[in-house]
Amino acid sequence: MEGDIAQLGQFVGAGLAAIGSGAAAIGVGHVAGNYLAGALRNPSAAASQTATLFIGLAFAEALGIFSFLVALLLMFAV
Amino acid sequence: MATETHEESTGLVFHPLDQFIVKPLFGEGPIHWYTITNVTLWMAIAVVAVLALFVFGSRGRAIVPTRTQSFGEMIYGFIYKMVEDVTGKDGLKYFPYILTIFIFILFANFLGLIPMSFTTTSHIAVTAVLGFGVFIIVTLIGFIKNGASFLSLFWMSDAPALLRPIIAIIEVISYFVRPVSHSIRLAGNIMAGHAVIKVFAGFAAIALISPVSVLAITAIYGLEVLVAGIQAYVFTILTCVYLKDALHPHH
């Protein structure tokens, strides 16, 4: 288990970056949940808003992917 | 992304990111821009598959479509409606470009799900070309169609006057981050999904938990089929949104 302090920092940092994925999960769930809540109140308007739903999901998810990317960079590229 | 060292002993028999290594198809040696690699092979397969779908699909031109023809017509109609809904009537001029992007990404994603195949869209180098291509084309269209008034995209005329310069700075930054997030979203989603499958495949070597692991791989594979379609859809619909901004910069 010997290693230098930089490697420790890499692994701790990658683990911390993984928290961002959880935060993005909250965001994606929020978007989908609010869409469903709105769609159940007014089902006739739901079909026209699926494009907006996917754009919202994509924006929320992209930030989680960024943190995943930071974790990958710390693990393999630094 | 795929040139990491193998010295670390992670406990896995293979590395989860080994599947993304770009190798020359013929022989060994350094990779130049003209070297035929596995990326080239799988991109070519994707292009041939798209061509086959549309050539064989449109060959019969039957009133009652065959399976191939109705699948081709379904994709065509789906993207046509999306461009019309999101971008508006004047965006239909750019429909061929958007259909090309969508169907290439869709086929590359799905071909990557075949076991032992190579996922071309998992590389940021590939998606960055697509993403920055969209960014440059959309910016050019915006300036050609609207001239200097395209810059009013960044100037919110209905915001309080004091806030307008600050909003303009934020809008400019968000405009230039668009191609980055546009390309990293696709590559990151596909790469993460495939890496997760390989991580669970590593657990399958342990006899005690291998049934759970195989079930988990099956479930994640199903999720990945979904993600492959959704990410192609998201990439395309964001292209349509950016195109709408370029054609109608006045909010």
Image (tube, helix red, strand yellow):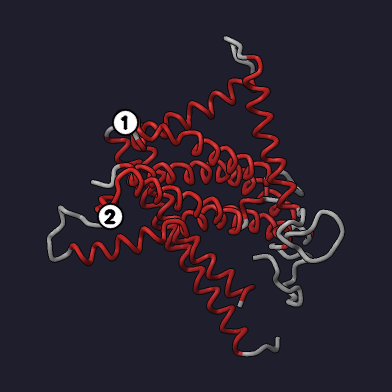
Residue visible at 65% across and 54% down? B194
How far apart marks 1 and 2 lie (CA) works out to 38 Å
Relative to residue B245, is residue A71 depicted above or below? below
Q: In this orientation, does residue B203 appear?
A: no
Q: Quadrant of the N terminus of chain B?
A: bottom right
Disc 2: host chain: B
Relative to residue B165, is residue B136 depicted above or below? above
Left or right: B84 with respect to B117?
A: left
Disc 1: host chain: A
Residue visible at 75% across and 67% down? B12
Q: Of discs 1 and 2, which sits in the foreground?
A: 2
Snapshot quadrant of residue B172: bottom left
Residue B202 at what x, y percent from top left? Answer: 73, 61
Q: Amino acid at mark 1?
A: Pro
Left or right: B89 with respect to B38?
A: left
Residue visible at 76% across and 57% down? B35
Q: In this orientation, does residue B38 appear?
A: yes
For label 2, the crowd category at 10 Å Cα-Cα, with few meaning under 14, some 14 to 19 and many 20 or more, is some
Residue B151 image label: 2
Left or right: B6 with respect to B190?
A: right
Q: Which residue is mark 1?
A: A43
